[in-house]
Image (tube, rainbow, N blue to C red):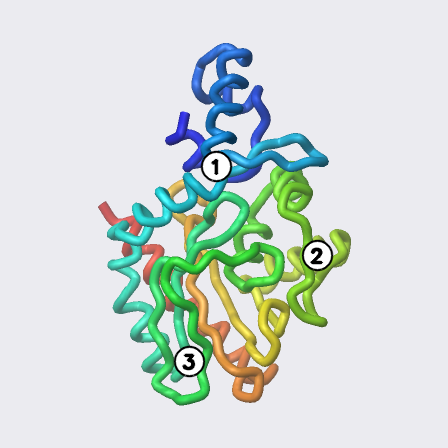
Amino acid sequence: MIEILARSRGPFSITDLATAAELPASTVHRLVQSLMSLGYVTQHQTSKRYGVGRGIADLNRAMLLKHEFSQHAQPYLERLVDETKESASLAALYGTSIIYLNHVESPLIMRVSTPVGTLAPLHCTASGKVFLADFGPELFEEVVSFSGLESYTRSTIGVRAALVRHLEEVNRQGYALDDEEYEEGARCIAVGLRGSSGAVSAAISISGPSVRMTDERIRELARLVRVIADEFAYKMREP
C-alpha cells in the first residue's frame, strides 16, 4: 500500500487505491485511516481525495535523491552552467509537488540556489508547469483542486482559467517559464524529459536573477536547454 501511495501521480480516491492494490474498498479504507494517523496520508477537505503525507514524503525523498537518474544528469547540468553561467537543476514529480534531485550552482555571486531535496509547487515553478502541461484534463483538475493555487508573489498565476491558457502556451513553445512567480527577482526556464512512454518523467531547468534573464536572453537560453534536455532524454532511453 505504501509503495502505491509513494508512486501516485496525483490525489487518489479509495476506489483508485482499491483497484491498484486489488483489495476490497473496505479494507483499503481501514488501511488509509491507519496511515493517516501515522502521517503517511493526508486528505483534502473539499474533494475528500487523498494525497501523500509528510511521513511518506520523508521516506521517499531519501530514496529519490540516491537514484542513479540524478547522478546521470550531472554532466548535462554542468554543461548548462558552463555555457550560461546560471544555476541548473533536475526535478521530478513528487505527489502534487516537484522535488529537486540535482543542482549545480552558477559561479556568479548573484545567483539562484535551490538545495537538493527541496519541494516546490507545480503551478508557479517552471519545472512544475512542465508536468502540469503534460497532464490530461482530469488529472490536472484533480491536482489543482487538491493543492490549490497559492500566491507566492505578485506574479503568481492564481486563476485556473489563466493557468490553463498559460500551460497551452508551454506546450506550444516547448518550454516553461517561471517569471518571478515563485520568488521575486528570479526567473527560470524548464524543459521536460520524456521517457519511453512519451510522458514527462523529469525536468531540466536553469534559473537566474531577473536582471540577467531578460526576455531576449530567455528565448536564447530556451533553445539551449531544449537541446541539452533532448540529449539527456535520448541517452537515458538507450538500452
Quarter of the picture holding the C terminus: top left
- Residue shown at 56% from the left, 48% from the top: 134
Kindly identify the amino acid type of the residue bearing the numbered disc 2: Leu
Q: CA distance from mark 2 to mark 3?
A: 27 Å
Instruction: Residue under label 1, please give it.
Output: 39
Q: Secondary structure at mark 3?
A: loop
Decide: marks 2, 3 in contact (CB < 8 A)? no
Horizontal and vertical percent position of residue 192: 46, 57
Which of the labelled discs sits on residue 171, or is there none? none
- Residue shown at 64% from the left, 37% from the top: 44
Q: Residue furthest left?
A: 239
Pick whichever, 236 or 105, lies toward us: 105
Q: CA distance from mark 2 to mark 1?
A: 31 Å
Query: Along the polypeptide, which appears first: circle 2 or circle 3?
Result: 3
Left or right? Give the position of 132 relative to 60.
right
Q: Secondary structure at mark 1?
A: loop
Instruction: Residue under label 3, please give it.
Output: 86
Kindly identify the amino acid type of the residue bearing the numbered disc 1: Gly
Q: How many marks?
A: 3
Q: CA distance from mark 3 to mark 1?
A: 38 Å
Packing grade of label 3 (10 A; few <14, some 14-19, many >=20) is: many
Horizontal and vertical percent position of residue 159: 76, 56
Camera-nearest label, 3 or 1: 1
Kindly identify the amino acid type of the residue bearing the numbered disc 3: Glu
Query: Along the polypeptide, which appears first: circle 2 or circle 1?
Result: 1
Left or right? Give the position of 185 relative to 74.
right
Q: Secondary structure at mark 2?
A: helix
Instruction: Residue under label 2, please give it.
Output: 163
